[in-house]
């Protein structure tokens, strides 16, 4: 009877275990950086990570958002010449190598974006330039009130160009501490081309610290993935059809992301029209004017999201031919471009590695 009872108990236990449901995917979502964020993740412990994710994004915003008057970047933009970051170079090296330490190091998120922007500036042959801020404001796309330019003042544009150029900001060493020196009070920074990608990466690293193996982090349509989706398959996203009238679910391509990130920049939503002339928010650091091009959107794929974010912006400034040539030469990234042909029809061009991501 004893053996029979143990056997019956074993069967009951086995039945109870088999009837237990698999842990469900959880979602944490909210607002950040002027858009939405949505984090979908599988946690065997079913922890609610909304608060730590939201808190982390707030800390990042407090350093890199030009819309927050007290942020680090706003303080730099208001500075006359020298801006003390207040931390030693050694501390910065540690926090940039491990973004999870950024909360313990003053202005680390600002510094990480500054360094990433500098690298992107070099990789895009100066097409990506975060010192474009004065012109972004002039054209009505910055932190100043968003107003369309009713009459273009070429002299004003030329006068603002004197403040544009990454060479106008120097990093100097003061007794082992980092200090930024700008050539003129008018020199300002804008991390709009790196912020969302950076925010995605720090959230992904936070999830990694919690031991999460399957997730999708989405900020404003830019994404980073790891592992599988709730169906047990690789995560998939759609590349929007770049037309103003297109629905948000109107996709030109559907892409499979295998532990991959993607960032898309386009000129088909953030623009305005004056006297029949369309002005987009992609401004040339050379001419000072919004870039005119047949290129409608650039999607860049990579392991992290910060690099694709910056490159996608730079590619939109470069235009189709230069962007495709450069994307074909850069390591560890792939790119897909949607452009308008002579008849106004949409066409797609992509680097060879992109084809493996397509879902028919």
Image (cartoon, helix red, strand yellow):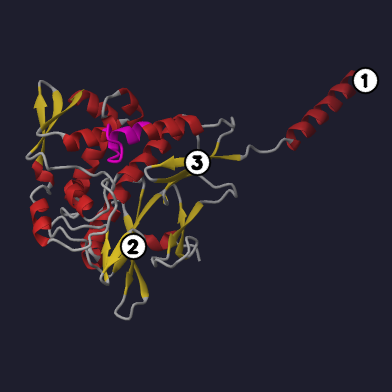
Q: Looking at the rendered structure, which numbered label has been put on residue 1?
A: 1
Q: Which residue is mark 3?
A: 29
Q: Which element carries disc 2, helix, strand or loop?
A: strand
> Mark 1 or mark 2: which is in front?
2
Task: Give the residue displayed 11% in from the left and 61% down from the top.
Answer: 154
> Mark 3 or mark 2: which is in front?
3
Q: Whole-percent x and y of residue 90?
A: 20, 24
**What is the span of residues highlighted in magenta in the rendered image?**
59-71
Q: Is residue 170 visible?
A: yes
Q: Whole-percent x and y of residue 121?
A: 18, 49
- Gap in Å between the C-alphas at discs 1 and 3? 56 Å
Q: Is residue 124 left or right of residue 34?
A: left
Q: Is residue 18 left or right of residue 219?
A: right
Which of these two is toward me, 213 or 200?
200
Mark 2 surroundings within 10 Å by alpha-carbon count, few (fewer than 14), some (14 through 19), many (20 or more): many
Disc nearer the start of the sequence (1/3): 1
Q: Which quadrant would residue 296 be assigned to in this image?
A: bottom left
């Amino acid at each position: 009877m004893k053996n029979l009872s143990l056997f019956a108990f074993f069967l009951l236990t086995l039945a109870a275990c088999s009837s237990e449901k698999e842990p469900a995917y959880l979602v944490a979502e909210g607002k950040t950086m002027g858009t939405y964020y949505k984090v979908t993740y599988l946690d065997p412990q079913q922890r609610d990570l909304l608060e730590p994710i939201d808190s982390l994004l707030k800390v990042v915003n407090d350093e890199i958002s030009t819309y927050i008057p007290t942020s680090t970047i706003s303080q730099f933009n208001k500075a006359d010449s020298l801006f003390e970051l207040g931390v030693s170079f050694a501390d910065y090296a540690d926090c940039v190598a491990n973004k999870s330490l950024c909360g313990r190091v003053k202005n680390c998120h600002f510094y990480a974006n500054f360094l990433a922007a500098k690298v992107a500036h070099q990789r895009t042959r100066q097409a990506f330039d975060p010192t474009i801020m004065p012109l972004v404001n002039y054209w009505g796309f910055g932190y100043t009130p968003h107003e369309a330019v009713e009459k273009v003042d070429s002299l004003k544009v030329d006068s603002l160009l004197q403040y544009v150029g990454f060479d106008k900001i120097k990093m100097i060493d003061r007794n082992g501490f980092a200090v930024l020196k700008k050539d003129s009070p008018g020199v300002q920074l804008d991390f709009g081309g790196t912020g969302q990608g950076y925010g995605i990466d720090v959230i992904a690293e936070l999830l990694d610290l919690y031991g999460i193996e399957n997730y999708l982090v989405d900020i404003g349509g830019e994404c980073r993935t790891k592992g599988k989706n709730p169906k047990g398959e690789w995560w998939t996203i759609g590349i929007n059809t770049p037309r103003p009238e297109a629905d948000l679910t109107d996709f030109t391509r559907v892409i499979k992301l295998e532990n991959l990130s993607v960032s898309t920049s386009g000129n088909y939503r953030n623009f305005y029209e004056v006297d029949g002339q369309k002005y987009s928010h992609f401004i040339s650091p050379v001419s000072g004017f919004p870039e005119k091009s047949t290129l409608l959107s650039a999607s860049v794929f990579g392991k992290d999201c910060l690099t694709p974010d910056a490159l996608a912006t730079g590619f939109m400034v470069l235009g189709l031919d230069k962007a495709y040539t450069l994307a074909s030469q850069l390591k560890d990234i792939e790119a897909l471009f949607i452009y308008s042909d002579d008849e106004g029809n949409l066409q797609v061009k992509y680097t060879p590695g992109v084809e493996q991501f397509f879902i028919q």
